[in-house]
Amino acid sequence: MLTLLGVLVFSLGLLGSIALHEIGHLLPAKKFGVKVPQYMVGFGPTLWSRKKGDTEYGIKAIPLGGYIRMIGMFPPNPAGVQDKEHLGRVGLMIESAREEVLAEISPIDEPRTFYRLSVPKKLAVMFGGPVMNLIIAAILFTISLSVIGRPEVTTTISEVVACVPTPANPNGITSTNSECVGSAQTPAAAIGLKAKDTLLSIDGIEIVTWDDLGTALATKAGQTVQVVYRTAQGDVITKSVEVATYEAAILDSAGNETGEYSNRGFLGISPAFDLVPTPVSQVPNFMATLTVASASALLDFPARVFGLAGDLFTEVPRDPQSPVSVIGIGRISGQIAGSEGIPGIYKVADLINLLASVNLFLFVFNMVPILPLDGGHIAGALYEGMRRQVARLRRKPLPGPVDTAKMLPVAYAMSLALLAMSVVVILADIIKPLAF
């Protein structure tokens, strides 16, 4: 039941993000007088719709995106009406699409076309969707990081190890009669430390973070130290105990064992984790780092999908870093919600982070300057503005709108590529699902 709830919560959150993305386009378009015949969440057959004013609002059957349809996305051909007999296949496709767009523009609606907007207004309309995703991500990350908090190691004890670990007893557990076999009792067990107690100092060294414990014990193996701790009931206790010696494997820079060992002090406790709120001022830096990582992942996306396709029907295990589709993300959200032994607040934080990360990725993805993505229209508007500035400097007549219809072949190729990659990733999430 919790797994299904997790999938449902994420699905509703994703649909809400899509709806708000399109509202980011819709509001400035209507503000600037552009006629918007349709606002739709999803693709395919319409499940529900209602018309209000000029716009039909609706939900479609395939919840993998959304769109608003503005009239006049393509301007009339600057060269005038074309003789189709002399057009090539690509030219014929462009002019046919242009005619379809222009056919729905009545004389009274001609001033309400998208192509007649000024460059700043075009940018406001096209930036509106991605910026909405960025705002959603910022709000969700702020809730997760600064309201709920991030899991951090604390100086509170979660578990006391009974016996000093040895090669024969690496986990430091006791025998059936609660005796340590082949090793000694840990100092923590000897002085009666318990779960939920909090370390305060070791031999005068204040224990503020968990790393302080390693520093305090580094050279104390075999020595008697003063341990000060606060019990779960609030009592502060000081006890003397001899620090145990533990042989720790020495690791190289790659994290592999070198075969050599060093002796270090060992107390015998495990730390507890707690949710520690992050200052709101650190959220932008966190998002900036994640945005750079998302952009890097996007650049690697085609190569990773190609590798995923090659291993799809083989016995090769799936790369944990491979791309995931909406299906895969939905499964991960279900696994998060259905995980046992994890406090509910941690699950809520993970689901919020997952949805925030998806929105941040949608922002980065939609900024790619290729049609049919928002970034393609933004690039077209910037180019139009640059042409007009050059014309002003040269004191020449201002050029008309950029003919974005000429980019339709690129848009169609991009759409086919995205569809093919989506199919590969969806199949991988069905055949070789990733486990969270």
Image: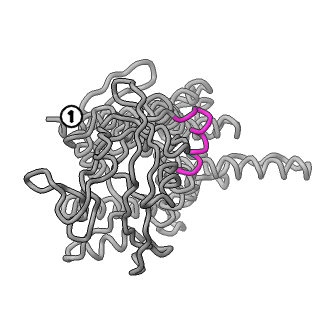
Q: Position of residue 247 (x, y in %)?
A: 37, 69
Residue 289 counted in the magenta span = yes
Residue numbers of the magenta segment:
278-290
Q: On the image, numbered disc 1 is attached to which residue? A: 5
Residue at coordinates 54% horizontally, 26% vertically from top-left?
Answer: 27
Closest to the observer, 320 or 117: 320
Looking at the rendered structure, the number of numbered marks drawn on it comes to 1
- Left or right: 77 in relation to 210: right
Evaluate whether residue 31 shows in this view.
yes
Toward which corner of the image does residue 351 lie, by quadrant?
top left
Q: Position of residue 124 (x, y in %)?
A: 63, 35
Evaluate whether residue 18 shows in this view.
no
Residue at coordinates 42% horizontally, 79% vertically from top-left?
Answer: 260
Q: Which residue occupies the extreme left position in the image? A: 176
- Chief secondary structure of the magenta portion: helix
Q: Position of residue 384 (x, y in %)?
A: 71, 49
Residue 170 counted in the magenta span = no
Q: Position of residue 188 (x, y in %)?
A: 33, 47
Closest to the observer, 198 or 43: 198
Toward which corner of the image does residue 287 lie, by quadrant?
top right
* 255 is higher (above) or lower (below) than 280: below
Q: Amino acid at mark 1?
A: Leu
* 368 is higher (above) or lower (below) than 157: below
SS label for mark 1: helix
Residue at coordinates 27% horizontally, 67% vertically from top-left?
Answer: 166
Residue count near mark 1 (Cα–Cα under 10 Å), binned few <14, some 14–19, many ≥20: some
